[in-house]
Image: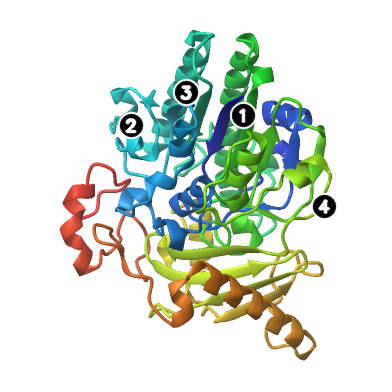
Amino acid sequence: MNVLYLNTHDIGRYLQTYGYPVHTPNLLRLSREGMAFTQMYCASPTCSPSRGAMLTGQYPHNNGLIGLSHRGFRINGEHHLANYMKQHGYETVLSGVQHEIKLHEEESLGYERCLNPMEYYRNDLPQCELYTWQDEIAAENAVNYLKNRGKDERPFFLAVGFGCTHREYPRVPDEYETDYVQVPKALPNLPDVRKDMAGMQIAVDTVDRLCGKILDALKETGEYENTLIFFTTDHGLPFPMMKCNLYDDGTGVSFILRYPGMPRVHCISDALLSQIDVFPTLCDILNMEKPNWLSGSSFLPVITGEEEEIREAVYAEINYHVAYEPVRSVRTKKNKYIVRWENGYDKVPPTHIDDSLSKEVFHENGYFEKKLVKEELYDLMLDPQERDNLIGEEAYQSVKDEMRQLLETWQKKTGDPLLTGQKICLPEGAICCTTDSYSTKTQVILPECRKYLEGLRGVLQNNIK
């Protein structure tokens, strides 16, 4: 059985499948022909650590990818899913975005072929145009690969990654009716925020259209009924209180799965799951032995209907994004517990919110002056938006103790350095900015990192001086 892995940046669950006001008919059709998962969570709400965790089946502090790959953070590529699939006889192919290793080092992850031509990496277009242009090429090359394969070739593992849902979004045409755009509940319903969301809608529409082209090619070549397909994203929307946050708006992700002979289709699952569980599940479906490094559990029993749940809780972490921000969380079906470790700064690192119109709205209203608390506890049944911190409420002390114990047990099991009071050290070759830097365009790089800047110049998204 072939495997097609479709992914895009930063959309959380912002799809028609999950009831959001966006037009994504191709992914909705895939959901109906397979299964959509409503309670899938990433292991880290930042780009590279999230992807690395899912594709190695290990938490970031275990696989090494504790920050962004283009900023010099590195993963143990031997544990990457592409490498494992290659070892099991698959032709491993990449088209478009990957964010687990620096550009042009994809072979170390296990990819035998990268379909991106050199022009894919051009840097003479603004990001708001470049990402969509790249995505069109990625989809076209994936389609051509599928149509030109020989019938007797090895089964394929094809990863197709899209980038236009990452900021900067495509430009919003003047005729676009931004007045009728619905903004997420966590954001104020203002003209600038509506325009911001319009850019996201345009990008999501593009990703769905390109996914449709690839799925159509699979059907035209007769491979649709011989291919496992899964679609997902890395974390929540790139807006304040979402991406780079351990609230559900940051860690909740879309996940759609479809494969031939799937025992249940045209349905959803509300099982509590982590993307850490994806690797072992694929092993079970494909009848491959699970490698011994996996931290997750297979949710095949959920797919078959034998079990409603496979885990009591899911865990997530932040270490580095642009700055250092050590945070951990544990989530059960009913409660969420978040704890922060010392980083010398008691407010939200401004660079951990992508530059945008929405960020400016929050800035103008004092968001970056608010002090963070060390611990947060939420009752997700009564407060799904996670706004009423119950950490000091007497009635919730037993819940707090239980959640603390769950988190500590997980930290011990996975060898989390934070449990023993250690700082998550910046790896050699990686860069980090000061926690009070406002924008990636004006960030102040830590002095000890400046020696690495020149080696990263070709892959950094911003010109850092």
Q: Is residue 276 above or below residue 124?
A: below
Q: CA distance from mark 2 to mark 1?
A: 23 Å
Q: Which residue is mark 2?
A: 125
3 and 4 marks in contact (CB < 8 Å) = no
Q: CA distance from mark 2 to mark 4?
A: 48 Å
Residue 136: which numbered mark, if any? 3
Q: Which residue is mark 1?
A: 208
Q: Secondary structure at mark 1?
A: helix
- Quarter-wise, where is residue 443 in the image? bottom left
Which residue is at a point 22% across and 46% down the rendered structure image?
457
Q: CA distance from mark 1 to mark 3?
A: 12 Å
Residue 308: which numbered mark, if any? 4
In-front residue for pair 463/379: 379
Q: Quadrant of the N terminus?
A: top right
Q: Secondary structure at mark 2?
A: loop
Q: Dot 4: within a 10 Å radius of its alpha carbon, few (fewer than 14), some, or many (20 or more) residues?
A: some
Amino acid under label 2? Leu
Q: CA distance from mark 3 to mark 4?
A: 39 Å
Q: CA distance from mark 1 to mark 4?
A: 30 Å
User: Which of marks 3 and 1 precedes in the sequence?
Assistant: 3
2 and 4 marks in contact (CB < 8 Å) = no
Q: Dot 3: within a 10 Å radius of its alpha carbon, few (fewer than 14), some, or many (20 or more) residues?
A: some
1 and 4 marks in contact (CB < 8 Å) = no
Amino acid under label 4? Glu
In-front residue for pair 349/303: 303
Amino acid under label 3? Glu
Q: Is residue 201 visible?
A: no
Q: Is residue 179 visible?
A: yes
| Residue 156 percent coordinates (x, y) | 51, 23
Which residue is at a point 59% across and 80% down the rendered structure image?
375
Q: CA distance from mark 3 to mark 2?
A: 15 Å
